[in-house]
Amino acid sequence: MHDAAEPILRVENLHTWFFTDGGVVRAVDGVSFTLHPGETLGIVGESGSGKSVTAKSIIRLLDEPARIVEGTISFRGRDMVHLSDEALREIRGAEIAMVFQDPMTSLNPVLRIGRQLVETMTAHRRFGAKAARERGVTLLRRMGMATPERAMNGWPHRFSGGMRQRVMLAMGFANEPTLLIADEPTTALDVTIQAQILDLLRELNADLGTAVILISHDLGVIADVCSRVLVMYAGEVVEEGAPEDLLSDPRHPYTWALLHAAPRLDQANDGDRRLTTIEGQPPDARDWPAGCRFRARCPFAVAKCVEHPDLLPIGEDRAARCWVTQDGATLRPPTHARAVGEARTATGVQPLLEVRALAKHFELPRDSFLEPHRILRAVDGVDFDVFPGETVGLVGESGCGKSTLARVVMRLTEPTEGRIVFDGQDITHMSQAAIRPLRRRMQMIFQDPYGSLNPRMMVGEILSGPLRLHGLVPAGGARERVRELLDLVGLPPAAAARFPHEFSGGQRQRISIARALAVEPGFIIGDEPISALDVNIQAQIINLMIGLQERLGLTYLFIAHDLAVVRHISDRIVVLYLGRVVETAPSQELFARPLHPYTNSLISAVPVPDPHLARRRRRIALQGEVPNAVDPPSGCRFRTRCPAAATRCAEETPSLTQAAPGHFVACHFPGSVTVV
Amino acid sequence: MLRYLASRLCIAVLMVLLATLVIFLIANMVPGDPVLTQLGDIAANNPDMVAAFRHRWGLDLPLWDRYWIFLTGLFHGDLGISIGSQRPVLEDIAQYAPATVELSTIAFLLALIVGLPLGVVAAMKRDTWIDHLARSISLVGVSAPTFWLAFVMLAVFYGALEWAPGPGQISASTFPPPTITGIMLIDAPLAGDWDTFWDAAAHLVLPSIVLAASTLGLITRTTRAAMLEALSQDYIRVARAKGLVRRSIMLGHALPNALLPVVTLGGLAYAQLLTGTVLTESIFSWPGLGRYTFQSAVRLDFPAIMGITLVVAAIYVLVNLLVDLSYAALDPRVSRR
Ligand SMILES: Nc1ncnc2c1ncn2[C@@H]1O[C@H](COP(=O)(O)OP(=O)(O)OP(=O)(O)O)[C@@H](O)[C@H]1O
Ligand code: SF4
Ligand code: SF4
Ligand SMILES: [Mg+2]
């Protein structure tokens, strides 16, 4: 395919190990690949598989106590492993640039944007100070900044995450590098912003011919941008090939599992909502198992797998590290028991939760004595119902008020206006004492499984705490109940005597769910409960939540920004924009016939792990970002970004009106912008 | 920025006023009667003399009236008459303050000029001999007791080696320059008297080292820690990935961030130096505020104590204001929201 040109980067048998006090962490353990000029290479794999360490090894940006113990990295003929520090410095930022995951912490907070951008160019003496400044303005404009001159003089803290990532990309491309390495550049961003950044990356690659290594844990993101993919597992490359081949016909069971663990927007779930998961944890990097490293979790394992397989070509232009597929076998897609799902939304019954005209305004601290308080309208007139036994999904970009809404509904903060009725009781202004018995029936699970569990308490105490609080300790003591709860969420009884830090992220989220379930609630609000987890663990938690719902008849209000996940588990979906509901409909209906321009652009922004479809699909490029909730736009709040906005939209606030049974939309011109 | 300044200034003035009130109340509640300490036993047994004394110094008025008198006086630049020296308190303070300001400022500059680079270098060369040296210096500086350090210094450099002059602000044989600012290092050159300047400078060496020691230790330690903290941030990794040279990563990226905690500490330390010279001044016979404070406290000289406290409060508030302003200048997140 690339025979014509010499590769610019050749990594061979790379071993990067960390020599820690607790042992040698073999983070990267025999990675080889080549990269040709202008090529886009994706690296996927779960957390800890060695993606970032591989990338950092290329420019030797390794933290102590890491060392490249074996292997060669040759970049345009230069031996990167043994290059002098000064020669290396001249390559960094000039020939190989790197963009990191977190744009919020990647810019120096006390230096102006312009200074940080300009020094990238002047450090390599390609541009003088003045020329660099001019080029900085041009670059920022190219990256889609509306007022680049002003941005040059701005301070980082004034910029949103998406804007900062544009600045980082401008720095990355400043010296016209041969290679740009982007380590999860969009993971910290909203889907809509992610789509903007990926578009930009693709364009820059096409226009400037810069080769790109894109690291992501999201196959959809990779398929969107890359022409080749490496799949990493346990410090090794386990599969390599073109995305269309890998995604339609994975030849390594781990790729197979990754592909089927994530719910997809382009595939309707007909009935069974369980996702395919692989059990267990990735192996310990200090002590890789002998034989195939995936064997303990592999559903396809055969006797031969006790020997360590090599990465060998299978078919044209692709390779896999698996005995089974090297023998010519293919991996068939998982089969589901396709029980036809019944809509769980009960009709004609009283809703379990009724929210009417709910608002929560925050008073911001004053800039100085002399100014009035500014009001941030986080939630500003929201109506929705949740019926017993159903799952309602709440979606919207960050800053739309999802978490605030959840906290107000739980009465963890006081509502400013409106009404909340839970199971027929008006709890809007109920005192905390009066609400206490109701707390038992509504529980909340949070995003961060690390922060929400007390690190000094054993899991057994964490689970029996709520029992004591609500006087629910059974006669035989809390022990038995704790064991039951652990069993319910798939943890062994021994977990009760351990501390939260001894568990992985997914296991901790299981513990939070067990804690929420301890008091036998009927209603659970999950605020991004799976967002911080790897795809496979996400799938496990989703399956757990679905199973619990079936067994215990739970009602869920599920907040997430991942549309595919929300569609997968929700019966109905509420789309929120700047503190208001813009559309609500049954899940199938919403995705079959999205009416609000915002819903359409959200859907179009989700990357799908199918390159053919990705290329065919229309992307509704959403301009800009969510405006500030202190001064929301007049009329329709979405009008500043809406491709269909008209004069009427600025003058008249659209109200939520029914377009089809159960399908409500707040737009003057519903259906004017469509993806499907 | 201007608005920020204005609101900080308002707060500062309020703080000083509040401080005077608190101090006034405390001063009037401490057990101990100035009548006794000032008049002596015999006169204190004579009711007429006591009444006259109390009337003369306003001690017979109700508390709030006395506070009011104090406040109105304050607005006219009048801090009352010292019971001990029988002179206006303001004059006393004006006489003693310059020596203290001179000593503390030199000590502070010394601590800053040595401590800051030492901390930066220690962080840059972490775990090398220079880092170990910096950490030892800061440990000694912070933990050595002032009086011990003062005696050792005097014994070694004055007594044994005779490298430095003894206690006092200038040598007995030297005539002080005409008072303009009251600060020798300024007044002497103004009078063209360079001999006196060098004599005064030599006398400053030992006491300022003694006074600077613990501040130097603190500044070194804080700078080092703040640099290490800054160096562990993501933006440093980005700077390395951009191919910047090491010096501009350290001084251009890490240092501006590391300065933030140092500014806070430095301000506090300077205020402490200005107000905490009692011990050092006594040992080095330094004619400064520290000694005046000591004398006034012993005599329960209320007007003087009030005046000194007011100065101390004003120093703290002023230094805090300076800290806030430099913070705002250094950290855009504070002032430019
Ligand atoms: N400073 C360090 N000290 C010791 N081990 C480390 C260090 N940094 C990374 N590792 C180990 O190296 C291995 C690979 O880490 P790496 O950061 O490359 O993973 P990754 O694939 O990028 O994961 P993620 O998706 O979480 O970013 C992990 O086992 C990790 O624990
Ligand atoms: S070699 Fe065996 S254990 Fe490893 S992935 Fe292939 S089938 Fe699974
Ligand atoms: S009301 Fe107007 S601006 Fe708002 S979404 Fe509809 S078309 Fe767009
Ligand atoms: Mg990583």
Image (cartoon, coloured by chain):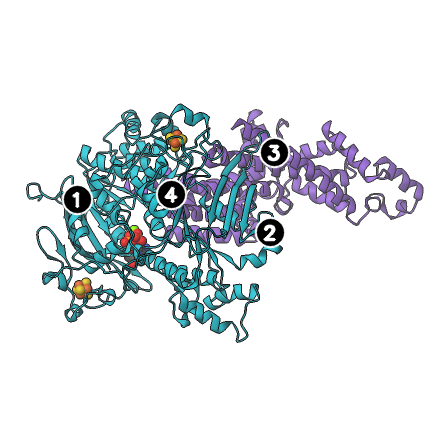
Of labels 1 and 4, the one closer to you: 1
Q: Position of residue A178 (x, y in %)?
A: 18, 38
Q: Which mark is in front, 2 or 1?
A: 1
User: Please, what secondary structure does the residue beneath circle 1 have?
Assistant: loop
User: Does residue A170 appear left or right of residue B205 in this picture?
Assistant: left
Res B147 label: 2
Callout 2: chain: B
Query: Sequence order check: which comes first, mark 1 or mark 4?
Result: 4
Q: State how far apart marks 3 and 2 are (Cα).
A: 27 Å
Q: Chain of mark 4?
A: A
Mark 3 vs mark 2: in front: 2
For the colour cyan, the matching chain is A
Q: Amino acid at mark 4?
A: Thr
State the purple chain. Answer: B
Q: Is residue A10 visible?
A: no
Question: Circle 3 is placed at which residue position?
Answer: B174
Dot 3 and dot 2 residues touching (CB under 8 Å): no
Q: Which residue is mark 1?
A: A227
Q: What is the spatial separation of the Cα atoms under label 2 and label 4, in whole angstroms?
A: 47 Å
Q: Disc 2 on helix, strand or loop?
A: helix
What amino acid type should be assigned to the residue bearing mark 1?
Ser
